[in-house]
Every structure is written in structure tokens, then in C-alpha cells.
Image: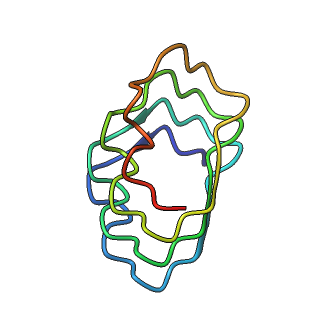
Amino acid sequence: NKLELIERYSFANLNSLKVLNLKGNLISAIKFQSFKNLTNLTELNLNDNCIFQLGESLFDNLASLNTIDLGLNFIQHFSNHIFFKLFN
């Protein structure tokens, strides 16, 4: 099965999670606060999906995030502030 949607709070509060690899799915939408409080997440791979839009606060509070792979998607536009609250 391939993921098509990441629902709100799908991965929220998984404090021990360091790497999240969602590469090669059919994800077209990521709901607000899907990644809420993943304080130890260092790598997020969303490569090779069907993502066309990213919410402005999608990556908020990912204090340890070093790498985001958004390649091979259909993203045409995103807010200038989408990465504003990333610390690394």
C-alpha cells in the first residue's frame, strides 16, 4: 500500500523519532500539525511523492531537523516563511 495523505497529528509527539522516510509514496497532501513536536527528528524524506503544496507552518517546531528532501514532487509554490522556524 502507498500513502496518499498524511493526516493531522499522524506523527505528532513521537519524541524518539530521528529519521522519517516517506519516500516513494503517493502523498499529495500533508495536513497541518502532522509533524507536531518531533523534537528529535533530524531527517525527513518526502522525495518522490505527489506533493504540490506545503502549508506555511508545516515544519514548525522541528528543532533538530537538519535535512528535508522534497525532490521529485510537484511543488510549484510555497511561502517564504515555511522554513522560518527551523533552527538548523
Image location (x, y in percent) of residue 17: 51, 78
- Please tell me how many numbered marks the rendered image carries: 0
Residue at figure coordinates x 56%, y 20% from the top left: 75
Q: Is residue 39 above or below residue 6?
A: below
Residue 75 to residue 14: above or below: above
Quarter where residue 56 is shown: top left
Please indicate whether residue 9 sits to the left or right of residue 51 in the image: left
Which residue occupies the foreground of this view, 59 or 2?
A: 59
Q: Which quarter of the rendered picture does the C terminus lie within?
A: bottom right
- Protein image colouring: rainbow
**Residue ID at (40%, 50%):** 59
Left-right relation of 55 to 43: left
> Residue drawn at (27%, 52%), measured in percent from left and top?
33
Q: Is residue 43 above or below residue 50?
A: below
Q: Is residue 33 left or right of residue 43?
A: left
Residue 16 vs 39, above or below: the answer is below
Res 57 → quadrant: top left
Residue 6 in the figure: left or right of residue 17? left
Q: Quadrant of residue 13?
A: bottom left
Q: Residue shown at 71%/43% (left/top)?
A: 24
Expressed as whole percent of the image width and height from the top left, the position of residue 71 reads 71, 34
Q: Position of residue 10 (x, y in %)?
A: 34, 60
Q: Residue furthest top?
A: 76
